[in-house]
Image (cartoon, helix red, strand yellow):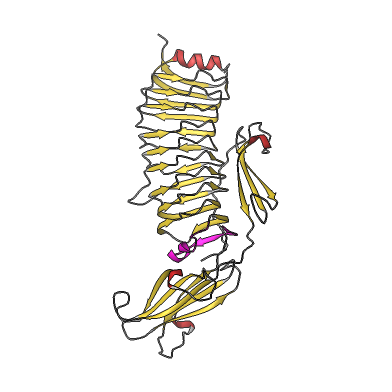
Amino acid sequence: MMRYFVLPLLMCACGDNFGAQLVRVTAEPPGAHCATGGKAVAVGLDRNGDGALQDSEIESTDYVCNVSEQPFQTLVDTKVEAPGANCAAGGIAIRTGRDGDGDGVLDDGEVLTITYICNADDGHHALVEMRPEPPGQNCYLGGVTIVVGTDLDDDGVLGAAEITGTSYLCNVSSGATLEGSYQIANTLDLALLAGVHTITGTLGTFGQLPEVELPDLETVGAIFINSLVIGVPALRTIGGNAGFNQCHQLTAPVLESVGGWLLAYTAGTLLPLDSLDLPALRTIGGDLFTSSQLVHVRLPALVSAGNIQQFWTEVTDLDLSSLQHVGSLTLDPRLLPAVSLPQLIDAANLAFIVDTATSIDVPVLASVGQLFIDADVLTALQMPEVTSIGGPVTITAPQLSSCVIDDILTQANYTGPRTIQAAPCP
């Protein structure tokens, strides 16, 4: 069913970071991008630190277009269901779909779902009532209210005490853009998103669904889905926050930008999320929150993020090879033999907690605030370009020469508080 709803916000203090992700929304006049006008959503990095997205800083622009067409009417009909595999004692088959040809009749080729309301074993019959639903909170563009129940008094009328369920079958835009927010409560709600490429508001789920596949969705204002299996193969842009909760499998191969925080998390389940593979993701405007049970973290295109403070103790495959700008970065890969961040330029805070890594390589790092390293077997630390350390500095690396640490601190002209436990200079 389609309705406006409010999601609980997960807030985190990210600090004032040079190179933060910014989004600028401006009116788009009718033209090549939007035939009837709309909004241009520009995304980029605040490279000059002024808090405003300048034209020269824009990296990508998406367009949310106005919808001029009339909505597809949603149709529903009912048929008597004979006793059989679907209903042992018989019942009613409810067919739903979109009136694609506009003739007001639900043709077989327009049916999206069939739901069976079965008669009770004691002989009472199932009843179904359909009522027009005006545009409003339950259906943004109007639709049909479906009320089902059992005729306990056998009078052929569905009384208030006999109702067992109510659902809303909502009209959707006939264009590729759905204005407003949409909530998925069942497979019917999911089926009605076929052909929708853009949702201007928030897309969410009501309760947990076993699987959510959205093959056509390309742009969404914000998303919060609670499902074991989530597939968004065409999704490129999430304007605000993104939550993929209780997720065992996430497929988003072309996702490029998340304007707010990104949550990919599983808790209390026998099917944990063990792989976060987002090969096209370039920017996360807010923080990254993930499950500690991850084994594979592959974000090879990620350039900037708010904070990444993760205890990936089980990770054996870590790829942050394009990361350049980040707020606080905490990595706790206990099983990796080495840690490499080949493109990282600046971080507000940087922490490495590694048990098995013998080397940490950050070859182009220029600026860092707090620096924390706890590495029992570390023998090589590469930070040849660092020129600014805000401090404090805490390094516990009993097998690393203190001369290596001294050279890094001297190069950065760092004279602030430090706690160093390292091997003596040879």
Please, is residue 17 above or below residue 95 in the view? above
Residue 221, how many percent across, how many down? 57, 52
Residue 304, how many percent across, how many down? 54, 35
Q: Quadrant of the C terminus?
A: top left
Residue 401, how many percent across, how many down? 42, 14
Please, is residue 408 above or below residue 245 in the view? above
Please, is residue 323 above or below residue 3 in the view? above
Q: Nearer the viewer, residue 146 or 85?
A: 85
Residue 105 visible in the snapshot: yes
Q: How many marks?
A: 0
Q: Over which residues does the magenta segment extend?
A: 177-196
In the picture, measured across the screen, residue 95 lies left or right of residue 101, that is: left
Q: Nearer the viewer, residue 414 or 223?
A: 223
Residue 86 within the magenta-colored segment of the rendering: no
Residue 54 visible in the snapshot: no
Q: Quadrant of residue 345?
A: top right
Residue 180 within the magenta-colored segment of the rendering: yes
